[in-house]
Image (tube, rainbow, N blue to C red):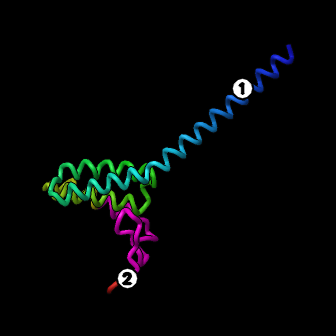
């Protein structure tokens, strides 16, 4: 009877380890897939906006905002960029109240250290301008 309890306990430990490994692997797979999703949505936003399809650009920007917030958090500069894109999509449609709200949120989402730095990730690609500030 003691052997059955040991085997049962060991089986539970193996099952727990397997579940833990699968959960960790699933989280890593999801996290690694998100940057590609973000780039695809950002490209769709740019295409729709350039063609003047602002309602589709708004939908893309809303999805972009959701994905970027989930991936990087609300205190990341990329989140501020996503909010800005959502704001300009609203502005292009004449929804000025919504545009103002999102553009203000974009300003407050930029971390203080980044606002004070001389570089800024102007695109979702993470390229930064190293040009000195003009007074």
**Figure check: 20 above or below 88:** above
Q: Which residue is drawn at 58% across and 42% down?
A: 25
Q: Which residue is drawn at 32% across and 48% down?
A: 63
Residue 30's disc number? none
First of labels 1, 2 by sequence position? 1
Q: In which quarter of the image is the N terminus?
A: top right
Q: Which residue is drawn at 73% across and 25% down?
A: 11
Residue closer to the observer: 96 or 67:
67
- Residue 133 location in percent, x, y? 36, 83
The picture quadrant where one finds residue 132 is bottom left
Image-based side of 4 in relation to 97, left or right: right
Q: Does the magenta stretch include residue 61?
A: no
Q: Distance between the residues labelled 1 and 2?
A: 59 Å
- Residue 60 location in percent, x, y? 27, 50
**Figure check: 125 above or below 57:** below
Q: Quadrant of the C terminus?
A: bottom left
Name the residue carrying label 2: 131
Label 1: few (<14), some or many (≥20) within 10 Å? few
Which residues are the magenta region?
A: 104-131
Label 2: few (<14), some or many (≥20) within 10 Å? few
């Amino acid at each position: 009877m003691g052997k059955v309890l040991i085997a049962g306990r060991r089986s539970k430990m193996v099952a727990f380890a397997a579940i833990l490994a699968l959960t960790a692997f699933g989280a890593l797979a999801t996290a690694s897939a998100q940057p590609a999703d973000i780039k695809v949505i950002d490209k769709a936003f740019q295409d729709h906006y350039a063609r003047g399809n602002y309602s589709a650009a708004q939908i893309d920007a809303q999805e972009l905002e959701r994905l970027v917030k989930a991936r990087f958090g609300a205190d990341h500069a990329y989140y501020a960029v996503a909010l800005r894109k959502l704001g300009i999509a609203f502005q292009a449609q004449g929804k000025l109240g919504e545009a103002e709200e999102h553009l203000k949120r974009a300003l407050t989402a930029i971390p203080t250290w980044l606002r004070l730095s001389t570089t800024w990730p102007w695109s979702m690609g993470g390229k930064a301008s190293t040009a000195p500030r003009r007074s």
